[in-house]
Image (cartoon, rainbow, N blue to C red):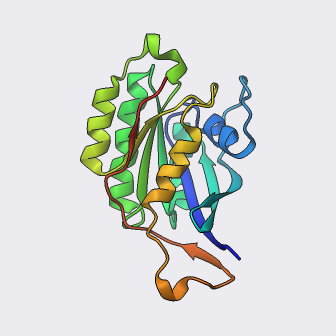
Amino acid sequence: MLTIREFKVCLLGDTGVGKSSIARRFTEDNFEPNVHPTIGASFMTKTVPYGNELHKFLIWDTAGQERFHSLAPLYYRGSSAAVLVYDITKLDSFHTLKKWVKELKEHGPENIVMAIAGNKCDLSDIRQVPLKESEEYAESIGAIMVETSAKDAVNIKELFQGISRKIPPLKAEENGRDEVIRLGSPNASIGQKRRCC
């Protein structure tokens, strides 16, 4: 029997960058073009095979509006990973992402896995954030970096596979247990870089 490991993952970033669309594309494999802004947070789950394990992602999609910012610690506290989302066509959203990274480093779980998603790469002809700049920034903080398109289903699975790769494997004495293991904060390391479109 496969071991199921649960990982709490929070999505952080400006309003309108596509956090909900990324979560929906990953969990339900669909895209809704007219998504209403998230109020507070929404919760979704998806279990995927990874090697000899099943990884169950408990995904907290947080609101991007400034008035909900104070609620964010409720969702990133105890998280195994944070997906920091920006819109490649909006430079301001990339600057906001850097503020989230600073907050996570100061107040988030120790060794939280950070993944950066440059969303809306289907609009690369009007991009404001160069891929090289975001890749260099991700490397400087030890984060996974992918450009995604929730609309076109580009690099969404790869984003979560990257998180799975950064989760430490079970120790030998833990293998063979038929139980759910709730994992707190895994060790972080330099992640995979993938190109979009």
Residue 152, compared with residue 50, is above or below; it is: above
Numbered disc total: 0
| Left or right of residue 178, residue 161 in this image | left
| Residue 46 in view of the camera | yes
Q: Position of residue 194 (x, y in %)?
A: 41, 36
The image quadrant of residue 4 is: bottom right
Residue that appears at 36% across and 50% down: 191
Q: Position of residue 48 (x, y in %)?
A: 66, 56
| Residue 38 in view of the camera | no
Residue that appears at 61% across and 68% down: 53
Residue that appears at 42% across and 16% down: 127
Q: Position of residue 152 (x, y in %)?
A: 63, 25
Camera-side residue of 172 and 104: 172
| Left or right of residue 111, residue 47 in this image | right
Residue that appears at 33% across and 33% down: 134
Q: Quadrant of the N terminus?
A: bottom right
Residue 161, compared with residue 98, is above or below; it is: below
